[in-house]
Structure formats: C-alpha cells, structure tokens
Amino acid sequence: MKVAIITGASRGIGRAIALELYKRGCNIVFNYTRSTQAAEELVKECTSTDRQALAYQVDAADFPAVQDMVKDVKSKLGRIDILVNNAGITNDKLIVRMKEEDWDKVLDTNLKSAFNFCRAVTPIMLKQESGRILNISSISGIVGMAGQANYSASKAGLIGLTKALAKELGSRNITVNALAPGMIETDMTATLSEDYKKSLLEQIPLRRFGQVDEIARIAAFLVSEDAAYITGQVIQVDGGLAM
Ligand code: NAD
C-alpha cells in the first residue's frame, strides 16, 4: 500500500489532497503547526481499517524536525511513495513596506520547507526506484503579483526546484511536478476584499474561484500511475486566469 506525505494538511487544499489520496487507497501522513484539533479531526475522518492516517506536529520549515519526522514515517510504514509539498502562507505587502522577517518567514515556509521534505524523502525514493513529488506552487510564481514579492518569489522558486529535481531523479523513476492553482476558495483567499475578489472574477475566463476538490483530483492524478510519463511540468489549475 502506498504511503503519501502531504505537508500542512490540517485544512484547505492540503486537507482535500490528503483525503483524496486516502480515498484512493494510500496511507496518509501529514504535518501541521498549530491546529491540533483540525489535525485530529482529519485523522478521525480516515476510518478504513486497512490503511493509516498519521499526523505530526512539525513545522515544515524546521530542517532537523522534518528529517526526524520522515525517519519515523519510514520506520512505521516502511516506505514513502508520494510527497506533496503543500504547506504555505502569504504575508502580502508592497516591497517598500516589506520587512526582512516578512520575506524570511514566507520563503522558509513555502520554499525551504519543500527542500526539507525533498531532502528527507529522496534517499528513500531513490532506493525504491520509484516516487512522486508534487510541489504546490501558484500562478503568482508564474506571472508575479504586485504586493506579493515574497510569495511570488517562493512560488517561482518551487518551479525551479521542480525542474531541477525532475532532471536529477528521472532516471530512477521519480517524477517531480508542480501544480499552480489560481484563485481557490480557502481560508487563504477568504481574507481578500470583496472589491478585489470582484475584479479578479472579471479576469477569470471561467468566472468563478476554484474549489479545493478540483485541485485535489488533479494532484491525485499527477501522483498516480497514470501520470508516469509527466515530469518537470507546471500544471495550472486556474480557470484560465494566467494565460
Ligand atoms: P490555507 O491557509 O488554508 O492552508 C495552508 C496550510 O499550510 C495550513 O494547514 C497551515 O497550517 C499549513 N502551514 C502553514 N505553515 C506551515 C508550516 N510552517 N509547517 C506546516 N504547515 C504549515 O491555504 P490553502 O489555500 O489551502 O493553501 C495551500 C497551498 O496552496 C499553499 O502552498 C498556497 O500557497 C497554495 N495556493 C493556494 C491558492 C488559493 O487560492 N487558495 C492559490 C495558489 C496556491
């Protein structure tokens, strides 16, 4: 049975991906930082007796803690087949107001976290001669967004990481792709002003925000056997926003 690690999965897109992979027969493992109750609820939702759901309270940006978590997962479940780097935050500000810590926190949470997990799981996947890595980027990393220098840079960084690792790991049957969502209805976008949301809707050809399940199903496809010949790609799931 496959083992999938999904980072930052106590809510939003990560939670939907974790549940979709569980539904499709994977053991799921996820980390979270603060929301213990939400993490426990997700574990409780996974009721099948033939597979597990494990939660770890681990900051994805903490290199040693991530190494320990992955070691523990390997010893408990024996293998790691899928890694979805989903943990992410925004801290939007114009560059003239952006403090050093605003930059560092977003880059550490969104980009260094992915390095931390890739660094920990790749020796295992290389030995298995199989693996799937999916990095949740954003259209902000493709087109850049004003007020999001830190976030756009982190998401563009994930695309570079994706392509470099796709080249590095492809010969061992490990695929590495990025999924770039547009505007998806989650807590992250709930804080946007109504006026801004309205102006965005006018630019989205499909005239609506996406749902987390729509991201989860594409993510599940990209880490499945059916996607065995797709690597190094950035798949936009954005209703046509960033063309
Ligand atoms: P969300 O805020 O609902 O969820 C983010 C998750 O990441 C939370 O569970 C949070 O606890 C976790 N997290 C944050 N920092 C962490 C850390 N240091 N360690 C472990 N977990 C941490 O947001 P979401 O909309 O579900 O976003 C999920 C991913 O999708 C993010 O990477 C985000 O950048 C990306 N994304 C979202 C949208 C959107 O419109 N919602 C668009 C493009 C990309």
Image (tube, rainbow, N blue to C red):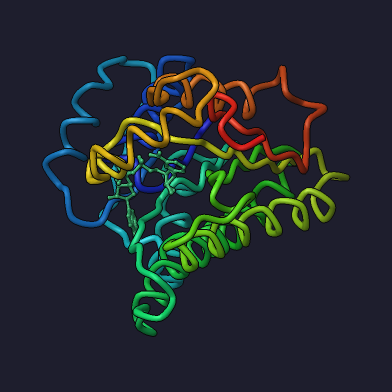
The spot of residue 120 in percent (x, y) is: 56, 60
Q: Position of residue 190 (x, y in %)?
A: 24, 39
- Residue 178 is left or right of residue 68, and the answer is right
Q: Is residue 87 left or right of residue 203?
A: left
Q: Residue shown at 62%/58% (left/top)?
A: 156
Camera-side residue of 198 and 221: 198
Kindly identify the residue that appears in the image at 63 percent across and 42 percent down.
178
Is 84 on the left-hand or right-hand side of 69? right
Q: Quadrant location of residue 173? A: top right
Residue 147 percent across, percent down from the top left: 42, 63
Front-most of 180 and 44? 180
Vertical side of 136 occupied by 119: above or below:
below
Q: Position of residue 133 (x, y in %)?
A: 63, 42
Please state, as top left, top right, bottom left or bottom right, where the C terminus lies in the image: top right
Residue at the extreme bottom of the image, as rendered: 100
Q: Quadrant of residue 161?
A: bottom right
